[in-house]
Image (cartoon, helix red, strand yellow):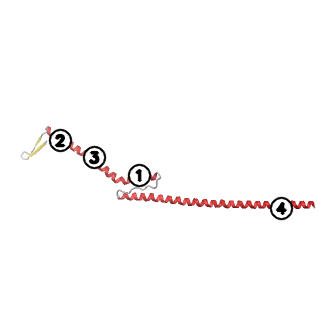
Amino acid sequence: MIVWKYIPDLDVYLVHVNLGKDLLKEMWIDSLLIILGIAALMLLLTVGVKYITNHLLSGFYTIMDGMKKVKEGDLSVQIPVSGIEEIQETQETFNLMTKTLTEQIEQIKTEQSLIADTEMKAMQNQINTKQTNLQNANALANANAQASANSQSTAIGNQLRQLTT
């Protein structure tokens, strides 16, 4: 322990230093308590910062998880809305985006299905028309062949009659 006093008549400082065992022991204990206090404060700050960070960013992590699922092809993802206002707005926008994408894809699938059905029906009509035309041409050819055969038979019959007469 250090004690001093100013003596104005002599214009001198009187200093007394006592470095006894008790004083060194007290200083060591005080130093140890300060170090332990600083360590406890650092631990508290670390835990506090971790908790606050997780609390503030938990909504952001849900958005990131949802984005990963969309990246993998799952557009039906709907994430929970929680956290601070800006994060909630982003989560709501994300949910609206995935819902809109899902609806648009379903609409495109429906339209493509209708287009494919219409094209199939048009092709079937073309095939049916060509088949009918072929059947008509075949019937006409058969009729012409029959008529030609009849006229040839008649011509042969006429020639035979002329020969016999």
Choose between 69 and 128: the one closer to the eye: 128
**Residue 151: which numbered mark, if any?**
4
Do the residues under discs 4 and 2 have CB atoms within 8 angstroms? no
Q: Nearer the viewer, mark 2 or mark 3?
A: 3
- The residue at the point 61 percent across, 60 percent down is 121
In space, the residues marked 3 and 4 are separated at their CA atoms by 118 Å
Number of other residues with Cα within 10 Å of mark 4, as a class: few under 14, some 14 to 19, many 20 or more: few
Mark 1, other Cα within 10 Å: few <14 / some 14–19 / many ≥20: some
> Is residue 148 found left or right of 53 in the rendered image?
right
Q: Amino acid at mark 1?
A: Asp
| Residue at which label 2 appears | 27
Mark 2, other Cα within 10 Å: few <14 / some 14–19 / many ≥20: few
Q: CA distance from mark 2 to mark 3?
A: 24 Å
SS of the residue under disc 1: helix
Residue drawn at 73 percent across, 61 percent down: 137
The answer to which of marks 4 and 2 sits earlier in the sequence is 2
Distance from label 1 to label 3 (Cα)? Answer: 30 Å
Task: Specify the amino acid type for callout 4.
Answer: Ser
SS under mark 4? helix
Residue type at numbered disc 2? Met
Q: Residue at horizontal 90%, vertical 61%?
A: 161
Q: Any mark on residue 43, and which?
A: 3
Determine whether 9 is above or below 106 in the image.
above
Query: Residue 122, percent across and down?
Result: 62, 61
Left or right for 32, reference 152: left
How far apart are the alpha carbons under marks 1 and 4? 88 Å
Q: Nearer the viewer, mark 1 or mark 4?
A: 4
